[in-house]
Amino acid sequence: MNERELISEIREGNSRQYRLLVAKYQQMIFRVCRGFVDQKEDAEDLAQEVFIKAYYALDSFDGRAAFSTWLYRIAINTCLNHQRKAGRSKLFVLLDKLSANDMQSARTKSDASPDAGRIMEVNDHATAIKKALAKLPAKQQTAFVLSKYEELPQQEIALIMETSVGAVEQLLQRAKQNLRGALAAYYQENCQ
């Protein structure tokens, strides 16, 4: 049974078949959600929310785009709404707590491991990258996550974001430029 037939069957009331779609796209949606949130558990919750929303909106899927494109849109909107609700400041507090915990853990290991300093440095750098990514405007963040986390071609990103390939190229360029600027400031402060 192909995907369109499967969707038709689900629409006709065979809701048990929906698990096949979930199984097929679960990892893809989880990766997208993970690109927007730091905690694995949050990404799992968001992915579950995406599939619930998609199930209830399945009648609105018109088939003009691929099902995966439609599902990406739901995932991105869900993640962006989550960010708005949670507020970016909460994300920064969480990242700071994680960074502090990682640093404490690395300090504890420093007596036993000569690489503990390197572990702390890597954790600090990862935290700086996550903070810089979270500060990007929503469209830049979306394009960047789809490009770098999902490794999607710009043409597919344009379909998902309902924009042109040229606009996606611009969003990616601006995202890279903004990330470079934010990270350059971080490295000037912390790595000299």
Image (spheres, rainbow, N blue to C red):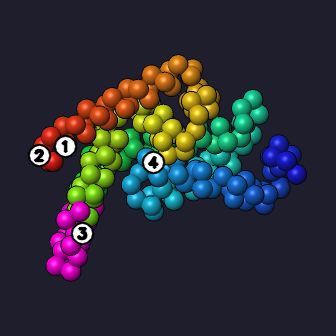
Query: What kind of residue is marked 1?
Result: Tyr
Residue position for label 4:
35
Mark 4 / mark 2, whichever is N-terminal: 4
Mark 1 / mark 2, whichever is N-terminal: 1
Residue position for label 3:
115
Is 115 magenta? The answer is: yes
> From where the camera sits, is residue 160 visible?
no
Label 2 Cα crowd, 10 Å radius (few <14 / some 14-19 / many 20+): few
Residue 187 has which mark? 1
Q: Left of 184 or right of it: where is 163?
A: right
Mark 3 / mark 1, whichever is N-terminal: 3
In percent of width and height, residue 24 lies at: 70, 55
Mark 2 / mark 3, whichever is N-terminal: 3
The answer to which quarter of the image holds residue 124 is bottom left
> From where the camera sits, is residue 61 visible?
yes
At a point 75% along the width and 40% down the height, the residue shown is 59
Provide the residue span drawn in magenta.
Answer: 97-118
Q: Secondary structure at mark 2?
A: loop
Q: CA distance from mark 2 to mark 3?
A: 20 Å
Q: Secondary structure at mark 3?
A: loop
Is 28 magenta? The answer is: no
